[in-house]
Amino acid sequence: MLILHHFDYSPFAEKARLALGFKHLPWASVQIPMVMPKPELMPLTGGYRKTPVLQIGADIYCDTRLIARELERRHPSPTLFPGGSRGLALALSHWSDTALFEPGAGLSMAVTTQVPEAVLADRREFFTFMDFSRLAGEVPHLSTQLRANAALLEEQLADGRPYLLGEHRGWADITAYFPVWMARTFVPAAEALLASNTRMHAWESRMRAIGHGVRTDMEAGAALEIARAATPDPGRDVEGGDPLGLSAGDQVSVTPADYGRVPVSGELVTLDLEEVAVRREDARVGTVVTHFPRIGYRIERA
């Protein structure tokens, strides 16, 4: 069973929901709080607080880039990476997560009335890439950055192709779509800012039509019980010659390198070019393995 821990207004969770819809998969939805504390999530992640998190039994997958890879590994058809686009599509995740997402997120925090004060207070500490003391004055700059990056999508679609890399949709489209979805949802000026992007607007309609697959609701307690009853993946061992000089069984911490820098500690069971995973013990769920992508995460001896 695929269990997504998320909240409906999470832009990054929209990526995962679209990937599940793209592959026509059934999945269980566990709604988590928008702000800390997240007491029903921490036993699974060991402290990682970003959204979303994909649970498969006692294996916990953090970060949408790794979620995409894992869904592709378990359910390869239809592929998220048509035409051999895996490397490029995953590389584009960094662009969309920063250059396209950050100005939209800044505008969401600065001008929208839809974000509750408790969320704003939480994000002031969480979004370390924003200077909230200057945010109101940054609106013109952020607006130009959103327009300029969205214009790249419009340019990519200029030859009439239906999707960013050609005739077939995939992860490149999903990862580029989510910041636009966020801007349309939370930034009142987005309609005017993006009005000239007519090809992009039609592409957005095609992306929305993908849907979210077959979703059912699940209580967080039930997800914890599933983790407790399951046996996690033993891991793929540790790649020899890795510059960090670590070995399977070492106690390590894994920390996001951008923001939300909460370390997750455990016993190293996987370390290769794509993934790092640690085995952890928790009183509520027993033994779980928490997985992260290698890119964008700092790994250190605990």
Image (cartoon, grey):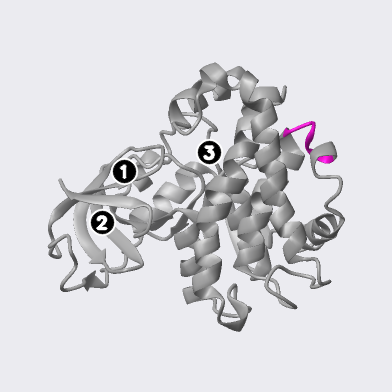
Q: Relative to 121, is 232 above or below? A: below
Mark 3 lies on a secondary structure that is loop
Mark 2 burial class by Cα count in 10 Å: few <14, some 14-19, many 20+: many
Tell me, for residue 46, which label it has, or none. Answer: 1
Local SS, label 1: loop
Circle 3 residue = 32
Q: Which residue is located at x 53 percent, y 21 percent? A: 132
Q: Within the image, what quadrant is residue 163 found in?
A: bottom right
Report the residue marked by disc 2. Answer: 278
Residue located 79% across and 71% down the image: 162
* Disc 1 residue type (three-letter): Gly
Disc 2 + disc 1, Cβ < 8 Å? yes
**Residue depicted at 83% across the width and 39% down the height:** 191
Q: Can you see residue 225?
A: yes
The segment highlighted magenta reads 187-191
Q: Residues within 10 Å of mark 3 (few under 14, many from 20)?
A: many
Q: Position of residue 139 (x, y in %)?
A: 67, 27
Type of amino acid at the residue the image marks with label 3: Ile
Secondary structure character of the magenta stretch overall: loop
Q: Earlier in the sequence, mark 2 or mark 1?
A: 1
Question: In the rendered image of this protein, does residue 251 appear above or below residue 118?
Answer: below
